[in-house]
Amino acid sequence: MSKPLLLPRRLFPHCVPGAGRMRAISPLSTSHRHQPQPLPRPLLATKSDIEYCRMLVQRHDYDNYLVSLFSPRLVREAVWAVRAMNIELVRVAHTTTNDITAQMRYSYWRDAVNSLYSDHPVQTPVFRAVYDAVQRYGMSKTWLRRLVSEREKTSARAPFNTVADVEKYGERAFACLIHPHLEALGVRDMHADNAARAIGVATAVMNFSRSLPAVLLQGRCDLPAELISKHNVDLESLYAHPRPTPELQEAVYEFATKGYTRLCGVAEIYIPSSPVQGFPALLAAVPVKEWLERLERAEFNVFDARLQRRSFRVLWMLWRASRKGTWLDASNYKS
């Protein structure tokens, strides 16, 4: 299927040069004007705990590991702790064989999150590191509890019926990883929170598109039913023999467009209104944008092997965005 490259220009019809720009920030910074709060309780995490979290994120969430490098050192450690907690939560669904065991493990995680706000937190490397992040930055329990509840829902999630269902899921399941990063940077702002939710939606679109070849082999499809029906995608045929088809590519194209337009809204509406010190957390949009643009170059064929490889352009794009204060470039502006 030959389709013109539409995402960067068509999805930004209203862009004008200079929109969505912020004052540049220094990448790989070890200092920041935001100072951690006075510590109400002694810290617990050791250097080996922090290193464990760092390595876990670097190995299993590499793109967001790169994002973390553009925050001050102590903020990076807080981000690694929360991201490592997410990785261990995701493992619960992959390593449990029955619902009863899964429920017991999620119950343990809920109790463990509650312990972070007491004098006796659970003693594991990840929880000691998260505990220190809570003590330094006053991270809201809301986001950590939501992280557990959304991962629990994911393990028993029904197929999505509409794109709006995916958007609602992304706002809750993925944005709750960005909100703690904002809080660690000292930002509690409505516009920044709206940006985090929009990036969460785009992240959900990317993740469900990227995992489509694997889930089709399992007899599932994470594309919304309304897109499957609209584009006459033959799921039974794809379950039997997963492969690119024109109908599937059209559905993926429309799905990806939804995610990319959310990133447009973040850059054009929320970024200019958000505190500049929160921008390192919102750089989480950059790896999503990069992957969606690769999907476009592959003509929305999710089976293209290049889409499963790590891109070395992400670090450069993060550095450029941090210097410019925006992730938009010339190709995103109306000619």
Image (cartoon, grey):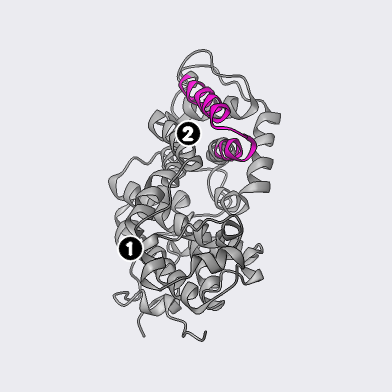
Tell me which residue sits at (56%, 67%) in the image.
Answer: 238
Q: Residue at x 51, y 71 (%)?
A: 293
Q: Main secondary structure of the magenta part?
A: helix
Residue 106 picture location, percent across and down: 52, 28
Question: Which numbered disc flags the more N-terminal residue, 2 or 1?
Answer: 2
User: The residue under label 2 is which amino acid type?
Assistant: Val
Q: Which of 143 and 238 is in front in this view?
A: 238
Residue closest to the eye, 99 or 87: 99
Q: Quadrant of the C terminus?
A: bottom left
The crowding category of the residue bearing disc 1, from other C-alpha atoms within 10 Å (few below 14, some 14 to 19, many at least 20), is some
Residue 143 versus residue 63 in the image, above or below:
above
Q: Which residue corresponds to the image point at 39% horizontal and 48% vertical from the top-left?
A: 169
Label 2 crowding class (10 Å Cα cut-off): few <14, some 14-19, many 20+? many
The residue under label 1 is 265
Question: For residue 30, which quarter of the picture?
Answer: top right
Q: In this view, does 39 lie to the left or right of 306?
A: left
Q: Percent from the top left, x then y, of residue 108? A: 53, 22
Q: Position of residue 126 (x, y in %)?
A: 61, 30
**Could you tell me residue 68's position as x and y percent?**
56, 48
Q: How far apart are marks 2 and 1 (CA)?
A: 28 Å
Residue type at numbered disc 1: Gly
Front-lying residue, 121 or 136: 121
User: How many numbered marks does the figure carry?
Assistant: 2
Q: Out of 86 and 67, give the one closest to the viewer.
A: 86
Residues shaded magenta: 86-114
Residue pictured at 47% horizontal, 55% vertical? 203
| Residue ID for mark 2 | 148
